[in-house]
């Protein structure tokens, strides 16, 4: 139920991002993979950089969203039109299916797109919920048409999640949010408008 | 008696007409003519490039035919997309059976990773092509896999998501091909 409520809440919040601009700075503690080992990262791990954040998962069963393709295209476009600024943006992809996605899975998955995109995984659902709620994103699981909740997820559950891409300032404040399928060339220009 | 004969005749004619419609299996939907006009096979092909493979690839179809099928299928896929990887063998088998002229267009992966995957899952028959990421936005595709079928220049079907039922798709493609023959 809490995931459903969170989803409803996110719909309201997404329609009024101006409210979110007044939110507290983003904080998180997640894992990334370095040399096959889990390394803790937080909001200060990329000092001075804008964080471009999306949530998702690697195991799309029937059709895969193209969020990370948009991120890859965005980076390629920034390489082309603003090569001196591209390094100011750190793309992050957080799995909202840590039950199925290992850190190795999410790292390999983001690597398919661009090595600059860092895959992140939470240690537990409380940690994940914490960051997801700060982003005003949402996620949930279903099985046979009914919502199911961790930690008792049945085999064959399906995953749902919101699909915005968020831009956070180096101070951890939400700067902008971009809808799904905006496409990299537009996204790159929208991001550049936000960079100093 | 006459009524029975007429009813039987109507059932026969109706059944034939129904069969001739070549009902599209999931996940395919027929595009409205305005939308279909945006998806011209030749124009999309021009935005893709052929990939060359070693001699283990590009076998000829198993079933001898008098001519190349006229029904065209174009599937868009990527190495990171699990359902894409799962359905590639199905499309290759359809090509092997000469059900249609089939093109598998990879979106944005490196040549090396495409070749590795093709070798791993043994794609032997279908033509593999490559395109840049932005082809997806040009085609207004919001996810992968995506498959287009051209039954003729005006009739285009689009299927978003994984293809499951090989036999149903094969039957449908055969039906479309017969309609091509009669057009």
Image: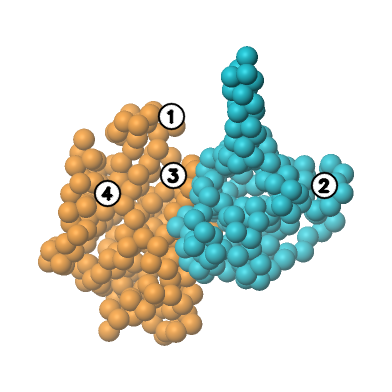
Chain colours: A orange, B cyan
Tell me the quadrant of the picture where the N terminus of chain A can be found. Answer: top left
The residue where tag 1 is placed is A155
Q: Residues within 10 Å of mark 1 (few under 14, many from 20)?
A: few
Labels 2, 3: front one: 2
Q: Chain of mark 3?
A: A
Q: Nearer the viewer, residue A72 or B177?
A: B177
Q: CA distance from mark 4 to mark 3?
A: 17 Å
Tell me the element at label 2: loop
- Which residue lies under the disc numbered 3? A101
Q: Is residue A97 above or below residue B116?
A: above
Q: Nearer the viewer, residue A20 or B2?
A: B2
Q: Where is residue A142 drawn, in percent x and y?
A: 34, 35
Most foreground residue, A25 or A80: A80
Residue at the image position 44 percent from the left and 44 percent from the top:
A101
Q: Say if residue A34 shows up in the picture.
A: no
The answer to whether residue B153 is above or below residue B10 is below
**Chain letter, disc 2 residue:** B
**In the picture provided, is B138 more to the left or to the right than B46?**
left
The residue positioned 49% from the left and 56% from the top of the image is B32
Which label is found at residue A138? 4
Residue at 69%, 68% (x, y): give it.
B49
Q: Secondary structure at mark 3?
A: loop
- Callout 4: 10 Å neighbours few (<14), some, many (20+)? many
Q: Is residue B161 above or below residue A21?
A: above
Mark whose residue sits in front, 3 or 1: 1
**Is label 2 on the same chain as label 4?**
no
Residue beneath the point at 39% across and 74% down: A186
Reading the image, the residue beneath label 2 is: B61
Q: Position of residue A194 (x, y in %)?
A: 28, 78
How far apart marks 1 and 4 lie (CA) works out to: 21 Å
């Amino acid at each position: 139920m809490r995931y459903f409520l969170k989803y409803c809440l996110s719909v309201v919040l997404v329609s009024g991002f101006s409210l979110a601009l007044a939110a507290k700075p983003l904080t998180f503690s997640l894992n990334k993979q370095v040399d096959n080992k889990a390394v803790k990262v937080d909001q200060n791990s990329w000092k001075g950089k804008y964080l471009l954040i999306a949530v998702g998962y690697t195991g799309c069963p029937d059709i895969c969203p193209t969020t990370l393709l948009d991120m890859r295209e965005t980076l390629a476009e920034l390489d082309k039109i603003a090569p001196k600024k591209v390094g100011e943006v750190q793309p992050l992809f957080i799995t909202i299916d840590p039950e199925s996605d290992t850190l190795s899975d999410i790292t390999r998955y983001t690597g398919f797109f661009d090595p600059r995109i860092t895959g992140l995984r939470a240690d537990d659902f409380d940690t994940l919920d914490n960051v997801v709620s700060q982003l005003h994103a949402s996620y949930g699981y279903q099985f046979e048409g009914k919502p199911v909740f961790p930690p008792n997820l049945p085999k064959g559950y399906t995953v749902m999640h919101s699909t915005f891409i968020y831009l956070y300032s180096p101070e951890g404040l939400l700067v902008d949010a971009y809808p799904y399928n905006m496409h990299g060339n537009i996204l790159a220009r929208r991001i550049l408008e936000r960079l100093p | 008696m006459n009524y029975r004969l007429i009813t039987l005749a109507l059932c026969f004619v109706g059944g034939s007409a129904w069969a001739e419609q070549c009902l599209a299996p999931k996940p395919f939907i027929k595009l409205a003519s305005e939308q279909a006009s945006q998806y011209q096979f030749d124009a999309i092909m021009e935005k893709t490039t052929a990939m060359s493979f070693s001699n283990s690839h590009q076998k000829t179809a198993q079933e001898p035919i008098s001519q190349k099928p006229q029904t065209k299928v174009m599937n868009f896929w990527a190495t990171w997309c699990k359902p894409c990887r799962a359905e590639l063998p199905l499309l290759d088998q359809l090509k092997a059976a000469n059900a249609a002229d089939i093109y598998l267009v990879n979106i944005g992966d490196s040549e090396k990773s495409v070749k590795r995957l093709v070798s791993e899952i043994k794609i032997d028959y279908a033509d593999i092509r490559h395109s840049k990421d932005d082809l997806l936005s040009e085609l207004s595709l919001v996810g992968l896999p995506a498959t287009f079928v051209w039954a003729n220049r005006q009739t285009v079907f689009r299927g978003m998501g994984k293809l499951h039922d090989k036999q149903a798709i094969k039957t449908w493609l055969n039906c479309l091909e017969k309609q091509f023959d009669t057009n």
